[in-house]
Structure formats: C-alpha cells, structure tokens
Amino acid sequence: MAEKIPLTAEGYEALKAEIKYRKTVERPAIVKAIAEARAHGDLSENAEYHAAKEQQGLNEARIAVLEDIMSRANVIDVSKLSGDQVKFGAKVTLIDEDTEEEITYRIVGEFEAEIKKGKISVTSPVARALIGKAVGDSVEVMTPGGGKYYEILNVEYC
C-alpha cells in the first residue's frame, strides 16, 4: 500500500492547478515546438527538435510525479483544527530565545513547503521539534551550527 502524503487543501488545489497548466498549456506548446522543429528537416542534427523532445520528457515526468502525489494525498482541512498544540497545518509564531526575533511558520506537506512564504515541511527539523508542543513551550531545534532555542508564542489554524 502506498504511503499517504499529508497536504493542506490549499496545497492540493495548487498541485491540481499545476497539472492542469502542464496538460493544457505546456503540453500543446511543446507539441507545436516539436512539429515546427520537425519541419526543418534532418532530425539528427536539429538542436531545436532535441531540446523540444527533452522539454516534453521533463514535462511528462513532472505530470507523472504530480499525479502520483495527488493519488496518495491525505488532504487535511486545517480550518477544522483548533487548540494550543502544534499539529500539521498550524500557523506557529515563535521567538528566537537568543536574538528575540519573532518568526512565523505554517506547517505544511513536504510538496507544498516554501520557506520564503513561511511554509515549512512537516518533515523539517523545525516542524518535527514543534509538533505536539503548545503555547509557552520552549523547543530546541538541532541545526548544523548547534541547537537553536525558540519559545512558542502563538498557535492558530486558519
């Protein structure tokens, strides 16, 4: 049995949108590029043809990966969760105990994580340290440079 992959509803919709885009926009554009390159004649020395075929392979591989993820998705409706304890889907505000800097993360599935948007994977060291903890708890996150200590200021589900 294939392992289930946790995703937020937002992450699931984003994957669905990417598949649709790749099938309805990317795929036809690549097919057109291949046809145009084929029209130039000798395929053995046709760089455009080979580039388009490579692009086609990459696009189809990405579609297959996305479809596999979606087929194994365990969509978790974060809006139905509540409490002070950190779980998948939580938006957690922390304070670095050394620098007093506040930071907010949302714990999401590994395929929807985007650190620049404050979304961290449930499998990341920070998320693993936070899961099961509650507001007011202090947590240690092991980093390559040693342990970092954070205090949980707020946990919300939205």
Image (cartoon, grey):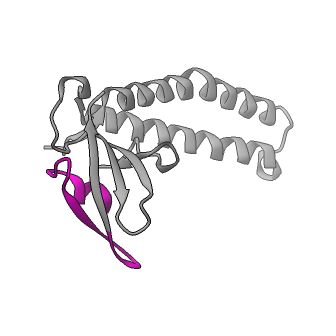
On the picture, is 132 further left or further right than 19?
left
Rendered position, 110 above or below 8? below
Q: Quadrant of the N terminus?
A: top left
Which image quarter: residue 34? Answer: top right
Instruction: Please name the residue shown 23% across and 25% down the image.
Output: 77
146 and 154: which one is in front? 154
Instruction: Please name the residue shown 17% across and 40% down the image.
Output: 84
- Asked if residue 96 lies in the magenta stretch, the reply is no
Residue 74 at x, y = what percent? 22, 33
46 and 121: which one is in front? 121
Instruction: Please name the residue shown 83% across and 44% down the image.
Output: 42
- Asked if residue 147 lies in the magenta stretch, the reply is yes
Rendered position, 27 above or below 6? above
Can residue 123 be seen from the camera position used here?
no
Residue 22 at x, y = what percent? 55, 29
On the picture, is 83 further left or further right than 113?
left
Q: What is the residue that sits farthest to the bottom in this orientation? A: 145
On the picture, is 102 further left or further right than 43?
left
Q: Bounds of the magenta span? A: 124-148
Residue 28 at x, y = what percent? 64, 24
Instruction: Please name the residue shown 33% across and 38% down the image.
Output: 68
Can residue 63 be seen from the camera position used here?
yes
Q: Quadrant of the C terminus?
A: top left
On the picture, is 35 further left or further right than 96?
right
Residue 133 at x, y = what percent? 16, 52
Q: What is the residue that sits farthest to the right in this orientation? A: 40
